[in-house]
């Protein structure tokens, strides 16, 4: 549910304390991997699972799979603690897209090692190609995996702007109607104090939320 920047920021917040038994770069690759579906390379149902818990993440057989499962856990927590409790803002026909963009803006500077993280995506790792390792068969071509790595590492390089958001949404095949609506909605939600506070509280409490 959150965008890839937010997934990385939240992973960075809790990795050292909670997931340090895993390989860091492979976990980070895994935590944004499920959204490769936006390139049309795979159906959402093959990378998004219900009822993922912290315990199931910790039991994962590989670091990549742990990151993939953590993506799912983060999605659920974001929906429960942000999307479902946001105030009704009558000016916004769809608050979901805009609040994800706002989360990226608010959280981006919480990470101070973006160059290191970008380096994790320099190459496709074996588990992305040979899914027998994680006992799942996603069947994604290497060219699509490489495109995904390049695409996400590109958005990690600079703090998001309206222009960079639009470029990224076009690359991952969002419709022009969706993009225009998000661009219209973002300034409104950006100035909405309750929405900003909900996101800030979510980030501050995230390490506790994943344990519930």
Image (cartoon, rainbow, N blue to C red):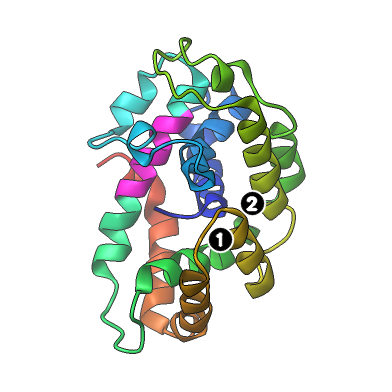
Question: In x, y percent, where is residue 125?
Answer: 64, 21
Asked if residue 21 shows in the view, the reply is no
Q: Residue at x 63, y 28 (%)?
A: 25
Q: Residue at x 47, y 31 (%)?
A: 67
- For residue 7, above or below residue 53: below
As drawn, is 104 to the left or to the right of 34?
Answer: right
What residue is pinned by disc 2? 111
Q: Residue at x 44, y 57 (%)?
A: 203
What are the residue bounds of the magenta stretch? 67-76
Question: In x, y percent, where is residue 111?
Answer: 64, 51
- For residue 131, above or below residue 68: above
The residue nearer to you, when weighing 169 against 188, is: 169
Q: Residue at x 35, y 54 (%)?
A: 78
Q: Is residue 70 magenta?
A: yes
Q: Is residue 73 magenta?
A: yes
What residue is pinned by disc 1? 107
């Amino acid at each position: 549910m959150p965008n890839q920047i937010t997934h990385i920021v939240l992973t960075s917040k809790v990795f050292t304390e909670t997931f340090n038994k895993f390989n860091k770069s492979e976990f980070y690759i895994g935590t944004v991997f499920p959204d490769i579906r936006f390139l049309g390379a795979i159906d959402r149902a093959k990378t998004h699972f219900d009822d993922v818990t912290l315990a199931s993440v910790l039991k994962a057989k590989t670091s990549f799979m742990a990151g993939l499962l953590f993506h799912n856990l983060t999605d659920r927590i974001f929906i429960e603690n942000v999307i479902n409790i946001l105030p009704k803002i009558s000016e916004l026909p769809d608050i979901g897209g805009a609040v994800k963009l706002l989360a990226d803006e608010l959280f981006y500077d919480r990470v101070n090692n973006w160059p290191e993280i970008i380096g994790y995506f320099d190459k496709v790792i074996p588990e992305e190609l040979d899914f027998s390792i994680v006992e799942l068969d996603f069947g994604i071509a290497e060219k699509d995996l490489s495109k995904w790595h390049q695409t996400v590492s590109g958005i990690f390089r600079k703090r998001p702007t309206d222009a960079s958001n639009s470029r990224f949404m076009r690359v991952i095949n969002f419709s022009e109607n969706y993009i225009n609506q998000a661009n219209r909605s973002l300034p409104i939600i950006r100035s909405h104090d309750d929405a900003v506070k909900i996101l800030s509280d979510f980030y501050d409490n995230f390490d506790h939320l994943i344990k519930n």
